[in-house]
Image (cartoon, rainbow, N blue to C red):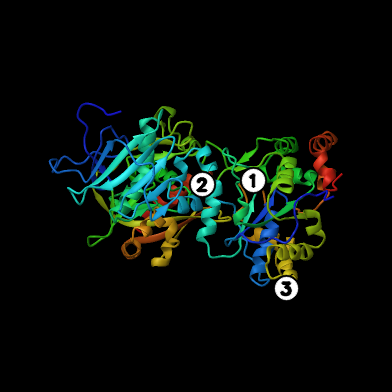
Amino acid sequence: MNLRGGNSAPAQGGQFGWLVSYPKSGNTWMRIMLQSLRNGGAPVDINESIDSHILNREEFEEHFGVESSDLAAPEIDAVRPELHRAIARASKDPLILRKVHDRCWLTASGERVFPPEVSRGAVYIVRDPRDVAVSFAHFFGLDLEAAVDSMADSTKTYASSSSRLTLQLSQQVGSWSEHVASWLDDAAMPLLLIRYEDMLADSARELEKVARFLGIPAEACAQAAAAAGFSTLREQEDKRGFREKVPSAARFFRQGRSGEGKEKLPIHLLERIENVHGAVMKRLGYL
Amino acid sequence: MTETGHLPDYSFFGLRLRSPFRLHSLPAWPALGSDEAPEIELCFGETPDSLAKPIWSSPFVQIGSDRTALVNISTVARFWIHGTIQAADMTIIVVQPAPGTEIFEIETILLGTVAGIVLHLRSLLPLHASCVVLGGRAIAFSGPCASGKSALAAALVRRGALLLSDDLLISDDSGQSVQAMVGTTQVRLWPDVMDRLEIPREQRLPTRLEHGKRAVAVPAVEARAWPLELMVSIESVGSVDEPVLVRRHGLPALFPFKELVYQQEIGRSLGNAAREFRGLTALANGAALFALRRTKVLDDLDRCADVVLSALGGGL
């Protein structure tokens, strides 16, 4: 029996390699390593464009010829699958890497938002939710209680505010455990599960797994892992900032270690996380 | 939905438009030469469900091989754009409203997505830019979605500039200098920006039902073409302590073109690529080009306006 779920057969067909995670789980780190790897292990300037960005309004408008900010959210949600297909049709790149914070969801008409026919596979990066909570609180400028609340919120969406315009399109995230389960159980495409804690232990090894899964030449994994080392990224952010940092965060590359949740979360929040997410935590070996 | 009584013709990005209902975000066509036929006629009527064999299509837009177009925003209206046999230079926009839609929603789609297509169909060059006039000089702001083009235009209007157009701008290079044609008389903003600019709630007009974006009428320039002297592209960067204006030169300063040209893919499907290149080259040669480097924080909006004003005051 496959306790972790998913289908970790090597990815095939399709152009999209989805780099999926709940927020604050190591997605950007993996993206930067992959960016370096695809450039033969070269250094990465974190303020130059990182290829594997989240779907945005520019692409929506380019492919659909419509002013996205004049549309209502359901009108945009309904055509997300078609947008992915349109991007795939228009791209000559055999592998399109995209960061994803959405859970794996269906449109109102029952269509898969991440269409299997244009997907090579999904890399799902998971992190101990107790550590996610601490990182999440720092990033969004929340107290720990509010971070834990947000991680339990089934209706959670990002970039969906009606009070401001964001470059990113709205994303349906859901709760932490729903997010994990939606991808592991229902991605309908090959899926590779990567643990953040394993990336900390040996990032080159985990990068190589991802590269082989996605069909990227893996020779330069050690150099790419070094180019995206935590201290290197942190140093770059210290010097020139990081364009993907949100205003609420003091910094993006903060600590990047594991075990912080158990140290910093009060007992009642640790219990709450276990109550809400315990089943999925057990499944992943976090309990 | 048709209004009775006299309605003016409107200036639709420099083209004369006749409408069966009042439009709140376009200036009236100047009275001189008022007997001339309009170049664009808006009317209510039946539209096709789809176009046969479109040369470009998306869930919202189809472009036909016969230079027709269909825009379908299912909860608002379908817009069928075509020419006439009688008058070669006339464009008809047939509007078939969806049940329960409001006129202001039709106007919203008309002045954005539909306008861009009409302008491409007429082989003009619509830019994704907002533009104000300061001291007789037109200054345009381009940049990606959500970079703050409209917000900066509105911030400058608050400091005494006049609005020339919001979000969509026609750059006309047919004469000796590049001209910006007058466009909309309203700027469309989101609540965070309107709060920041202290725009009273009663001045915030809806653009769509159950939608955050609002239209605000602002002091607008005289409805004519103005020399486009400055083109500023807004760039969000990782961290700058203060917004900074950087001089740029030549065509590469306008990269990426797909960000600057409104609905570039549609223009290219209509064979406008050479026209686009000619227009952007004229713009690069005719206007002073700048990048405004700023952080993503809304709080720097006033400082961005300061930087632009002080640079202008310094005699750019």
**Three-letter code for the amino acid on which mark 3 is drawn:** Glu
Q: Which mark is residue A159?
A: none
Identify the secondary structure beneath mark 1.
loop
Q: Measured from the top left, where is residue B164 in percent x and y?
A: 32, 46
Q: Nearer the viewer, mark 1 or mark 2?
A: 1
In the image, taking residue B225 as reference, residue A67 lies left or right, namely: right
What is the residue that sits farthest to the front in this orientation?
B52
Chain of the residue displaying label 2: B
**Residue labelled with disc 3:** A219
Pointer 1 and pointer 2 on the same chain: no
**Three-letter code for the amino acid on which mark 2 is drawn:** Asp
Q: Earlier in the sequence, mark 3 or mark 1?
A: 1
In the image, taking residue B88 as reference, residue B104 lies left or right, namely: right
**Residue labelled with disc 1:** A102
Q: Measured from the top left, where is residue A114 in percent x and y?
A: 61, 50
> Is residue B225 shown above or below A46?
above
**Residue labelled with disc 2:** B300
